[in-house]
Amino acid sequence: MTGEPDKKALLGQLRIDRQPEPEHRVPGRRAWIAGAVAALLVLLGGGAWLALSGRGGLAVHTATAQALSASGGVASVLDATGYVTARREATVSAQITGTVTQVLFDEGDHVKAGQVIARLDDTAQRAALAQSQAQLQSAQAVLTEDEAQLAQYKRDVKRDEDLVTRHLVSEQETEQARTQVDTGSALVQSQKKQIELAAANVRAAQVQLDYCTVRAPFTGVVIAKAAQVGEIVSPFSAGGGFTRTGIGTLVDMDSLEIEVDVNEAYINRVEPGQPVVSVLNAYPDWRIPSHVIAIIPTADRSKATVKVRIGFDTRDARIVPDMGVRVSFEEKAAAGAAPVQRLPGVLVPADALRKDAGEDVVFVVQDRRALRRAVTVGGGSGDSRQVLAGLSAGETVIVDAPAGLKDGAAVTEAK
């Protein structure tokens, strides 16, 4: 009897305990899982923020704010793009081949017509000038001698003529004296011609010396410096490509104008004298009054375009050659009629406007970023709205801006 309890006790010690282990045996497991989930959420949130406001470049649809005419429509009858060009531009070079000893200008310098901008080595030219001047002086000295001899011959003739009347000398001696006078006169005339030749040589040598001094042909701005001291320049392409043919490039800023290519299908909307509004790509908020100078009477067969020259009504130092420009050809008023008047503000798509904190705003694209701009809204016309203040013609606005778009967010134009 006493053996059965002992067996049961032993069997109880051999039983496997299937209860789960206490949680304290795996310390920190739940805390680690919770931290990983939180980090993942932070990364997802940061990626979304970058997509909207920073590096992602949110794709958006854009439109251009347009000016209004007095009739309420867009003032321009045709828009085109082109470049600023100079009608008066020259690459200045010396008229002789020589070595540059001085360059008296730099890029961006303003120079006046006739101003010295460079000098060449003039040693040979100065020597040639001195030689020709010496020859001139020698010829003048010979002329003085010949004229003195001629004066003596004339005195001899006069004296012999007096003696002939008194029968003191023969007639033959008098004729010989007259012959000497004629010969002396011929020598004097010949020497005068020699002096003219020597004087011409002096002038030619002076011209060659002047060619060593390079002057600005007109008033303008230097846009390129092509030669340095010590280089050889020539008006001809020589020396196997190692000789400079120009010293610098000069542009007359008063001759700047715009050249645009207009599709030949719309050239009938353009005429000389027509008012134009020009907007430089570098200054999108600056509207420059302009006008059509001429329509070049030929078409480009490959592009089906006609070139149009446009002049600026005002000059400004910010306008430089080769700048990109957008132009809007405006309606030309009929003869005797008042010029086209613009309504205040610009016209934009209605979808570009939105309400934010109780005010009307648009998002303007500048340097690939969306900039929030508060505006004053006027009337509407179809799908467009008039913006009275806060926006200029030519600026690019975002249409149907996403709700999460923030001021300063990076954007790209949707294709």
Image (cartoon, grey):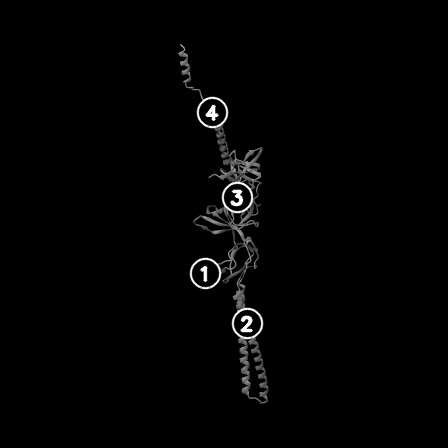
Q: Nearer the viewer, residue 55 or 298?
A: 55
Q: Nearer the viewer, mark 4 or mark 1?
A: 4
Q: Name the residue tied to disc 3.
A: 76
Dot 2 amino acid type: Ala
Between the C-alphas of marks 3 and 2, the distance is: 72 Å
Q: Compared with residue 388, is residue 258 higher up or lower down, i.e. above or below?
A: below
Rate crowding at label 2 as few (under 14), some (14 to 19) or many (20 or more) other CA atoms within 10 Å. some
State which tag comes first along the sequence, 4 or 2: 4
Question: Which amino acid, by three-letter code, is at mark 1?
Answer: Gly
As drawn, the label of residue 134 is 2
- Residue 83 % position (x, y): 50, 49
Report the residue that reaches farthest toward the bottom. Answer: 167
Q: Residue at x 47, y 49 (%)?
A: 306
Q: CA distance from mark 4 to mark 2?
A: 119 Å
* Amino acid residing under circle 4: Arg
* First along the sequence among labels 4 and 3: 4
Q: Earlier in the sequence, mark 3 or mark 2?
A: 3
Q: Position of residue 355 (x, y in %)?
A: 56, 33
Task: Estimate the spatial distance between the alpha carbons at disc 1 and disc 3, rounded to whole Å.
Answer: 54 Å
**Sequence-first disc among 1 and 3:** 3
How far apart in space, not on screen, are marks 2 and 1 (Cα)? 35 Å
Q: How many marks?
A: 4
Kindly indicate whether the residue at mark 2 contacts the one at mark 3 (C-beta within 8 angstroms): no
Q: Tell me which label, 2 or 1, sits earlier in the chain.
A: 2
Of mark 4 and mark 1, the one earlier in the sequence is 4
Q: Which x, y percent locates residue 406?
A: 54, 36
Around disc 1, counting alpha carbons within 10 Å, would you say few (fewer than 14), some (14 to 19), or many (20 or more)? few
Tell me the kind of residue under disc 3.
Ser
- Label 4 CA crowd tier, 10 Å (few <14, some 14–19, many 20+): few
Image-quadrant location for residue 380? top right
Which residue in the protein does label 4 denote? 25
Q: Are circles 4 and 1 on residues that touch, CB within 8 Å?
A: no
